[in-house]
Amino acid sequence: MEVSSFSAYPTTYLCSSSTELFLRKRVKLPLWNHFSVPISWSKRTAQPLLSKTGRVVHNRNSLKVLCSQEREIPILEARPKLVVRHDLGDYKVAWVCMDEIYDALAERLIPTSAIASNPNAKYIVGLAGPPGAGKSTLASEVVRRINTIWPQKASSFDSQVKPPDVAIVIPMDGFHLYRSQLDAMENPKEAHARRGAPWTFDPLLLLNCLKNLKNQGSVYAPSFDHGVGDPVEDNIFVSLQHKVIIVEGNYLFLEEGDWKDISSMFDEKWFIDVDLDMAMQRVIKRHISTGKPPDVAKWRIEYNDRPNAELIIKSKKNADLVIKSIEL
């Protein structure tokens, strides 16, 4: 699916959350029932519309899809909402908007009844981004929304019977090399220290998993046990009823070796763009929450996580859609 393909001219549509009309470009999404996300549209050639960043900003719409300047990749960005958070104390506020991103992405991936009844139909979305970008959260939230909305759309189902889920997540974490495989490497200490780098995964296993899914319609995939620190084989079952599969992981859009073949397996590719320092702050909190001393956590950020993140960010250019992540 070519998310970067647009109709030739801008069209005006009515925003569902407001009576105001906004300028949009319709994203070409041929396989599913989608609604058009309100977007702001700009090109370098449209000089009167450009701000200094090359983006158009409308004050009242909450979701924006902008064009990146390299390959005109759509950028999905929610406008923050200022709300009172009582859990933060009296008069404290927080910016909340990622829910709108989740809603928009879920709505556009809702399969039609015809496709849902086709046992061979599968729509595989690759979701990449650096550590701390929020990939797991976005994938799980979008899938949860799809599985909640789908029974309301599936009029052919008995209202008293819950239809099977049509969406599922396959995390790339399950394709880590086992600790025993790292132990067998030439420099085991370095291998464990750099765990999370591309060469500490098994991309061929992931590639074969995706091929089997496309060819057979169902597959068993591994998960990852963070308590044990190793993958758990065949722990995720993608059935014939699953029509939307989100594969989330760091290196899905790399252009080297088996990673390049993996990237070609996706019907659509999403990249979560996040401020690198903010992402690393999230990761260091994650390390400390798992029991690592603060000094060890900081060392791991500089030695492993940040270099990995810098590599991953270079693959953003291969995405069909960029999603801006914000701090909540």
Image (spheres, rainbow, N blue to C red):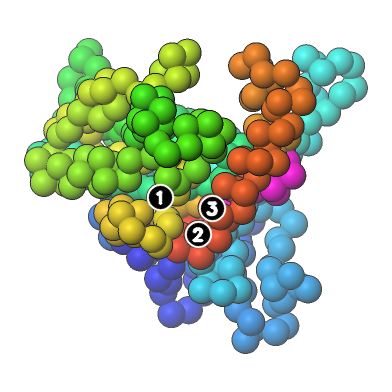
Relative horizontal placement of residue 223, taking residue 291 as reference (left or right): left
Q: Residues within 10 Å of mark 2 (few under 14, many from 20)?
A: some
Mark 3 is surrounded, within 10 Å at the Cα level, by few (under 14), some (14 to 19) or many (20 or more) other residues, namely many
Left or right: 233 as drawn, with respect to 47: left
Asked whether the viewer can see residue 328, the reply is no
Identify the residue at horizontal 53%, vertical 31% (top origin). 189
- The answer to whether 282 is drawn above or below residue 115 in the figure is above
Image position, residue 287 (x, y; %):
64, 24
Rendered view: 286 above or below 248: above
Residue picked out by circle 1: 252
The residue labelled by disc 2 is 315
Q: Which residue is mark 3?
A: 312
From which residue to which does the magenta span run?
273-279
Among numbered discs 2 and 1, the one appearing first in the sequence: 1
Marks 2/3: CA distance?
Answer: 5 Å
Residue 82 circle label = none
| Quarter placement of the C terminus | top right
Quadrant housing residue 313: bottom right
Spatial CA distance of label 2 from label 1 is 9 Å
- The one nearer the camera, 187 or 274, is 187
